Image: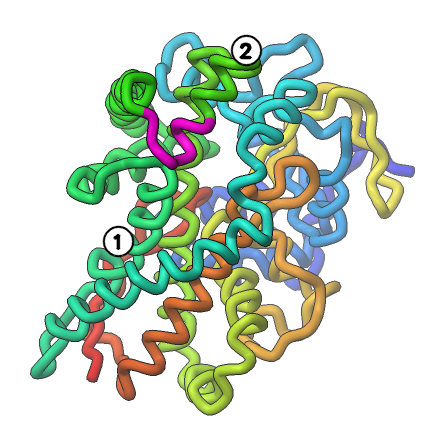
Amino acid sequence: MRDWDCLTMVTDVDRSDRTADEIFADVLTPQGRSQMGALYTELHGLGEFHRSRLVGRLVTGYRAADAVLRHPAARRNRPDGRSILPRVEEHSSRRLIGRTMLMVDPPDHTRLRRLVSKAFTPRSVTGLAPAITELLTSQMDDLAERAADGAVVDLMAGLAFRLPVAVIGRMLGVPAAEQPGFQQMVRDLNAVVEPLADSGDLSAADVAADALEAYFKDLVRERRTRPCEDLTSALISARDDDDRLSENELVATLVQLFTAGFETTTNLIGNGMLALLENPDQLAALRADPSMMASAVEEMLRYDSPVQASSRVTSAEIVLPDGTIVPENRFLLVVLGAANHDPRVFTEPQRLILRRAEAPPLSFGNGIHYCLGAGLARLEARMVFTELLRRFHTIELAGPPERQAFMTIWGLSRLPLRME
């Protein structure tokens, strides 16, 4: 067995003389992110685990990542109870996120997740299909009208953002007229989970967090006076009747459900559409056989994951599948995007293969923190791509796509298309 504290990293494997830190530093730059697949290949040449001065320890192999995500001693908070997020006391965004189920451990995580999980069971998600169809039909009509006569449309603004935010907004009771204003706030808030966010990024995240917290506090006050048939009212009832949610937990949970409820799906739609356009043979295959839509969405998740990384800290010594020992109180950055491109698990991982039938992607994580809304995101994506290919016989890029600034929450800010 190997202990990271006495391991000397080998850096001359797979024709590379660069260290994992040098490679990962490139991943964190805009130029490097444009070649992320090649950088992940380079990291895989060095192994599944990498000691890093930048972020502690990098986990890039699929089996190692899966093991860490499932391990009960790989937690969100340090053994002494301190948050895994640095400088929490300085940033309201980190304090807010730190109260969500995303960043807490059992037993609090178990309690919070149980309160909202009924809304995201397979049966509940399936029951949302008629409402999603209604919203999608209306938005697709708008998109077709704007795309008429060869006009350029932005898929991100015109559909990829609008549909998921409308779905989660309806679930929580956020009025449709207020939903467009949240897009930039949520993007600013994403800096809170970036490995190397700078002070400017975190200042913008704090402003966004304060605005989101204030909004949902107001919504809670309104629903206490006038309850509705929505998830916000249900969570208020759970809090008031059983005292299982503190007021801070209630608001933080609503913020998390709303922001995560559309951002991941938005990026899945944008990243997936771009992947199809860059692989026209696979786009043609999907048009010819729409029955493979479910496997196609899984491959889109693997190929260009909307979430590229997730952090953990060890609360006790853990042993990983190859025998590597990770001591207590070690920070781990699990690079989900790299794990999804592990050549030990995926044949030709840099290729988009919509009929791929290998290991499931780790894009939604695994273990107790597996994304609660994964089923809803998959359903929305399947419905979106089915309808796009049915409505438009030609879909092509009308200019260079634009990426968002961050690496952890990975998506496009603009995808200009011509569609007929």
Tag 2 secondary structure? loop
Tag 1 secondary structure? helix
Seen at 21% across and 44% down, the residue is 176
On the question of residue 127 being in view, the answer is yes
Q: Quadrant of the N terminus?
A: top right
Q: Quadrant of the C terminus?
A: bottom left
User: Between disc 2 and disc 1, whose residue precedes?
Assistant: 1
On the question of residue 53 being in view, the answer is no
Provide residue 272's location: percent of width, then percent of height: 42, 66
Q: Quadrant of residue 199?
A: top left
Query: Magenta segment range?
Result: 227-234
Name the amino acid, label 1: Arg
Name the amino acid, label 2: Asp
Provide residue 4's location: percent of width, then percent of height: 78, 32
User: 79 above or below 304?
Assistant: above
Q: Which residue is mark 1?
A: 162
Q: Is residue 113 left or right of residue 230?
A: right
Camera-near label (2 vs 1) is 2
Provide residue 5's location: percent of width, then percent of height: 78, 27
How are the residues colored?
A: rainbow
* Mark number, residue 270: none
Q: Quadrant of residue 311?
A: top right
Q: Which residue is mark 2?
A: 243
User: 349 above or below 123?
Assistant: below
Residue 395 magenta-highlighted: no
| Label pair 2/1, CB-CB below 8 angstroms | no
